[in-house]
Amino acid sequence: MLRRILLIIVVGALSGPIFASEVVEKAIRSETAEEAVSLATAEVLAFISAGKSYADDDPEKFYRDAEFLLRPMIDFTRFARNVMGPYYKAATPQQRENFAESFKWSLVRTYALALVEFGDGEVAVLPPRRPPRNPNKVNVLQEITYQGRTYAVAYKMQRSSEQVWRIQNMVVEGVNVGINYKTQFASAMKDPQYGGDMDAVIAAWSDVLEPSDAADVSTTSETAPT
């Protein structure tokens, strides 16, 4: 279930149809993180409709289109760095780059096809509970109502020096996605199957995630991303 929820959340918060790049660009350059999430969310139904028409017949195109949409809004490089945790410092620049790319595509491929299962849903961005300590680092709270159930989501958003908002982590129903992936990476590095070989872990990243469905591994409960 969390696999489907995560896809709904990622796309519901970030995506628009392929032809709506201007909307996505406007969203990520919004004055506030809440506005960024709200503007992008407005495009989700059009993308879902378009995706259903070809996802089964041409899944590779669907993956590419999903990546095209997610790329502007998710800081895949920073996300991947956090997932590597203490192993990041030991990694070579090439290994860091390889993992960021592998991480990006595993995330896209794992959840993209689940998108077509998302039907009618209502998404609401909640007003901030209090002014942020740092206006460029904000946790955005969101509620998604899907098939009669409401899911709570928190996004860790950061605004770059270019004044662009990007997601660096998220918490879904109390499950910290970044920590889940970090736990998986650390476990793989200690797994005799890979013999502590970072290149092997990076190459097998999609397989590392698959047995436990990634999102369901941890029971870490937090109200906001860290």
Image: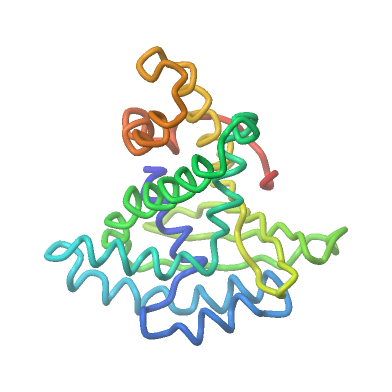
Residue at the location (37% across, 75% down)? 45
Q: Between 167 and 162, which is closer to the camera in this rendering?
A: 162
Colouring chosen for the image of the structure: rainbow
In terms of image quadrants, where is residue 46?
bottom left
Q: Position of residue 69 (x, y in %)?
A: 43, 70
Residue most toward the left? 57
Which quarter of the rendered picture does the C terminus lie within? top right
Residue 126 is left or right of residue 13, and the answer is right
Residue at the location (56% across, 53% down)? 77
Q: Position of residue 26 (x, y in %)?
A: 58, 84
Residue at the location (18% across, 73% down)? 53
Q: Between 13 and 1, which is closer to the camera in this rendering?
A: 13
Q: Position of residue 180 (x, y in %)?
A: 52, 34
In terms of image quadrants, where is residue 168?
bottom right
Q: Compared with residue 85, is residue 169 higher up or lower down, i.e. above or below?
A: below
Residue most toward the top? 192
